[in-house]
Amino acid sequence: MLRVLLLILPLLAGLAQATPHTTEQRPLSLQTEQGTLYGTLLLPQSDRPLPIALLIAGSGPTDRDGNNPGGGHNDSLKRLAQALAKQGIASLRYDKRGVAASRAATPDERDLSVEQYVADAVAWGHQLKADSQFSRLVLIGHSEGALIASLAAPEAGADALISLAGSSRPIDQVLREQLHYRLPRKLLAQSNALLDALVAGRQTEQVADELQVLFRPSVQPYLISLFRQNPAEAFARVRMPTLIVQGSHDIQVDVADARNLKIANSNAELALIAGMNHVLRIVPLDLKAQLASYDNPRLPLARLLTEQIVSFIQRTGTAIPSSHS
């Protein structure tokens, strides 16, 4: 039977009564063959090892806080890390290679790939697992980061996985759907032709000016590596406690994606949060309000988001460990 966490239930007593923890913030770095990656560790004060969440950002030049220089300063991952710390859960969030403080690790986006992002998440996981301050490792991937987390979790030795606003479909299919309603007919035909070529592993040098932001030649190698992936298949291979979190007002990823992830991995828990959008805020289904929320860090996170994540981490921490194979 489909196990959906009903979000209209009363607050969990333990969570509602939790006392905020004093939290230390530290810089943390990861040495790789291509260069150094940089992140931020939030460590609640405790006299015993704590669970730690590795937060993995979404697509594009999204930094450790969930912000994008192209227009999107909402601090979604920073706010999530702070909310977890208040409940005694440590976290590490990091700038992906080629982004912000980690830019020097891969300065040319032609050299980026999904496989490299996965290797980085695995390496961060190993570093955290080796630290005696932490009892368990939970990977939390947001949007495209959910795919990276699913691919990385087994090798990273994760104890649990949370897919946050993650697609179940190959990303080229998601792009086709989004662009279908946003591009005029001529540009739509060109974008579909570009997508067909990239899915087949072919790069295209001639790209219309209006499509450069999505399909510029320098980003095409990454897109080819991304389009090879099937998020539902990757999620189905995960053998550990898993939670799917999806907002009903997400204009980028549909609730159907969350349900399909649940079908792919029947042991996963599914939490649908009414009114939550892609940047984890409660926002009406109005395009103006939606777009404004992407650039407003003052909006509070959806309260039930934190509750569901904290409850999952706490419950799975007391369960019998499952195989990572």
Image (cartoon, rainbow, N blue to C red):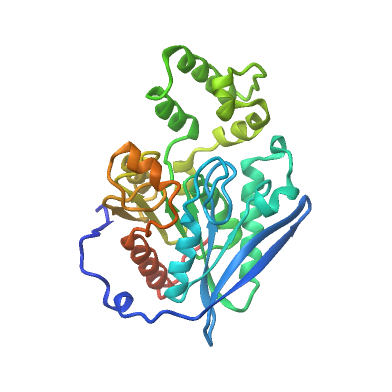
- Relative image position of residue 281 (x, y in whole percent): 36, 53
- Marks counted in the figure total 0
In this rendering, would 240 be left or right of 151?
Answer: left
The residue furthest bottom is 47
- Relative image position of residue 191 (x, y in whole percent): 51, 20
In this rendering, would 287 be left or right of 44?
Answer: left
Residue beneath the point at 49% across and 57% down: 77
Residue beneath the point at 33% across and 75% down: 15
In this rendering, would 115 be left or right of 140?
Answer: right
Is residue 238 visible from the viewing direction of this image?
Answer: no
Quarter location, residue 155: bottom right
The residue furthest top is 186
* Quadrant including the C terminus: bottom right
Is residue 102 visible from the viewing direction of this image?
Answer: yes
- Relative image position of residue 269 (x, y in whole percent): 34, 57
Instruction: Look at the picture and state if 212 lies above or below 117.
Output: above
- Relative image position of residue 316 (x, y in whole percent): 41, 69
Instruction: Look at the picture and state if 79 lies above or below 224.
Output: below
Foreground of the two, 165 or 283: 283
Residue beneath the point at 50% across and 50% down: 73
